[in-house]
Image: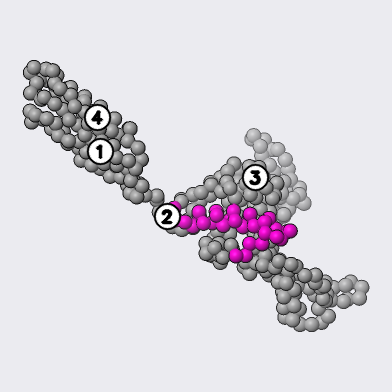
Amino acid sequence: MSCCSKRYIAIIMTISGIACFFFSRRSSTATRSLTTSSKSPASSCSSIVASSTMTNGDSNNSYGLTCSSLGKGGSSFSCNSFNNRESPPQTQPGLCGLSNLGNTCFMNSALQCLSNTPPLTDYFLEDKYEAEINQDNPLGMRGEIAEAYAELIKQMWSGRHSHVAPRMFKTQVGRFAPQFSGYQQQDSQELLAFLLDGLHEDLNRVKKKPYLELKDANGRPDVVVAKEAWENHQLRNDSIIVDIFHGLFKSTLVCPKCSKVSVTFDPFCYLTLPLPLKKDRPMDVFLVFADPQRRPTQYRVVVPMMGAVSDLCDALSKLSSIPVENMMVTDVYNHRFHKIFQMDEGLSHIMPKDNIFVSHDVQPH
């Protein structure tokens, strides 16, 4: 076979394979045949037959390509079929991130907290919520918040996603709470409070809430008063949110005039607690001795967060054995004395990056 004939055969095979691959449709089988006659007198190949088959099944997402051998002259071409199985990645159920839609990390953090509350998540994964949706509750949201949250939880716990985008859930929240409709940063605790209240009213088992009058303790034991308060609360509020999150908070009031004591048990869904504040802070200071032969020494002292300069001198005196009355506290900025502190000044005026030098004076102040 001549060189030109071989090149011609290779071109025909390439075109046939490309046409077979790109023009086949999903879940279909295409067979193409191409027959040409060689006009070259030196060619011993009278005909070329190329056939290809490609299948794309929905079950295993496989692709196959086969080509028949070419005519005479001992030249042949074969292509083995190949499979490309693309199965969705499997992840641990619940181990799923939430995409940040703008600045919605406040919402994602609240959702992750609720998602990792096992009794609540099991309630939605087992579809128990469907029988308890209260669409007639005027304080609810026609069950739409509960359904949107259920759909999101099912995606997060399906094991098919490493992360999901809670767009549909956020849209539903924005419809009933316009303050969360944008993509700006909001308070996470406020979103969590809205979500718990919305889920409670959407899933409230009480269809008609009765009117109740609160009773005073009148010296009765706390156990009796608390039980009565909880039963009254459940007459108007009964949902999975109540079962998991609600409790009673004891409140005691004493009249300053007649000394009467009033004890009540009020229901709560969450408690707002302040973050603990540090009582102390470390400070780095340089002590400059009166003796010019001694090099300045850096000390790290621990002082009260709301303390005074005198507290700084007291702590430094314990480490250096220099009396407080022989100390002068200064702030050095750009190699110059910027300020001289008085003993009664607060330490809140001293920033962490300030260069504080304490001079040892022989003459007491």
User: Where 257 falls versus 124 (above or below)?
Assistant: below
Residue segment shown in magenta:
131-160
Which three-letter amino acid code belongs to the residue tagged 4? Ser
Rendering coords of residue 271 (x, y %): 69, 63
Rendering coords of residue 29 (x, y %): 29, 40
Q: CA separation, marks 2 and 4?
A: 41 Å
Residue linked to disc 1: 53
On the picture, is 305 further left or further right than 163? right
Residue linked to disc 4: 16
Ranked by sequence position, the earlier of labels 3 and 2 is: 2
The quadrant in which residue 45 appears is top left
Looking at the rendered structure, the secondary structure element under dot 1 is: strand
Packing grade of label 4 (10 A; few <14, some 14-19, many >=20) is some
Marks 1,4: beta carbons within 8 A: no
- Report the mark closest to the observer, 2 or 4: 4
Whether 90 is among the magenta residues is no
Colour treatment of the image: one colour
Residue linked to disc 3: 185
Q: Residue at x 34, y 43 (%)?
A: 27
